[in-house]
């Protein structure tokens, strides 16, 4: 099964390599070519083939974004993706937690739970940073409480009541514990 299709000018402009894929070169990869037979494809016969399905394997990788700061990447990928976020580089305690999370595989819950914890810690670090710059954050507005009060007053009252009940229970627990000493 050798691919003898020649590439059109448009395909070459879209990054298709002029060298065709030789199936023998990939036989060592378990499962490679499993979808070569269209009748073995789960979408057969519903899929509307456009004749360019083979092109997904023959593209040139785009030029990579320059890396000018620490970028955390999965241990399961050998290289950085071509495009990555640089808005919030790892810093402080949240950065330490993120670095730790990326020592774990993406299939482990500890990877994702640590990243969620790092997000929460980063939010607190942001508030502390604001206070350090003399900015008092308007937490109720940032959490959307005025809009909730305006559009879902019953839900807002339920949320306030729940918060008061939990806070009262915790305060009562510590008061009783303190009075027993």
Image: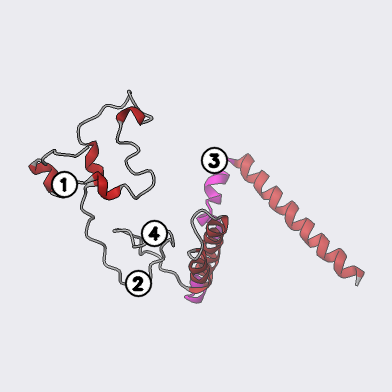
Q: Residues within 10 Å of mark 4 (few under 14, many from 20)?
A: few
| Badge 1 or badge 3: first in the primary sequence | 1
User: Rounded to the nearest whole Å, what is the CA distance between mark 1 and mark 3?
Assistant: 49 Å
Q: Which residue is mark 3?
A: 151
Residue lying furthest right in this view?
A: 180
The x, y position of residue 94, in whole percent, is 51, 68
Work out whether residue 9 or residue 130 is closer to the camera in this orientation and state it.
Answer: 9
User: Rounded to the nearest whole Å, what is the CA distance between mark 2 and mark 1?
Assistant: 30 Å
| Badge 3 or badge 4: first in the primary sequence | 4
- Left or right of 165: which side holds 68? left
Residue 50 vertical position relative to residue 54 in the rendered view, above or below: above
What range is drawn magenta here? Answer: 129-152
Q: Which residue is mark 2?
A: 69
Quarter of the view holding residue 177: bottom right
Q: Residues within 10 Å of mark 3 (few under 14, many from 20)?
A: few
The x, y position of residue 37, in whole percent, is 30, 32
Q: Which residue is mark 1?
A: 14
User: Rounded to the nearest whole Å, what is the CA distance between mark 2 and mark 4?
Assistant: 19 Å
Q: Residues within 10 Å of mark 2 (few under 14, many from 20)?
A: few
Q: Quadrant of the C terminus?
A: bottom right
The x, y position of residue 161, in whole percent, is 70, 48
Q: Which residue is mark 4?
A: 77
Name the element at disc 3.
Answer: helix
Name the element at disc 2.
Answer: loop
Residue 38 vertical position relative to residue 144 in the rendered view, above or below: above
Label 3 near label 1: C-beta < 8 Å? no
Viewer can see residue 125: yes
| Badge 2 or badge 4: first in the primary sequence | 2
- Left or right of 93: which side holds 57? left
Would you say residue 132 sits in the magenta stretch?
yes
Nearest to the eye among marks 2 and 3: give it.
Answer: 2
């Amino acid at each position: 099964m050798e691919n003898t299709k020649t590439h059109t000018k448009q395909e070459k402009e879209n990054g298709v390599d002029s060298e065709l894929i030789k199936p023998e070169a990939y036989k060592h990869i378990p499962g490679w070519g499993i979808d070569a037979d269209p009748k073995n494809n789960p979408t057969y016969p519903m899929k509307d083939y456009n004749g360019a399905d083979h092109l997904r394997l023959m593209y040139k990788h785009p030029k990579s974004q320059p890396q000018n700061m620490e970028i955390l990447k999965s241990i399961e990928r050998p290289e950085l993706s071509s495009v990555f976020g640089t808005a919030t580089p790892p810093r402080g305690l949240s950065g330490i937690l993120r670095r730790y999370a990326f020592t774990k595989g993406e299939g482990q819950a500890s990877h994702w739970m640590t990243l969620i914890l790092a997000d929460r810690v980063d939010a607190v670090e942001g508030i502390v940073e604001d206070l350090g710059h003399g900015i008092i954050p308007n937490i109720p507005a940032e959490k959307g409480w005025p809009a909730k009060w305006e559009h879902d007053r019953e839900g807002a009252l339920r949320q306030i009541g729940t918060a008061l009940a939990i806070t009262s229970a915790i305060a009562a627990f510590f008061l009783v514990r303190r009075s027993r000493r």
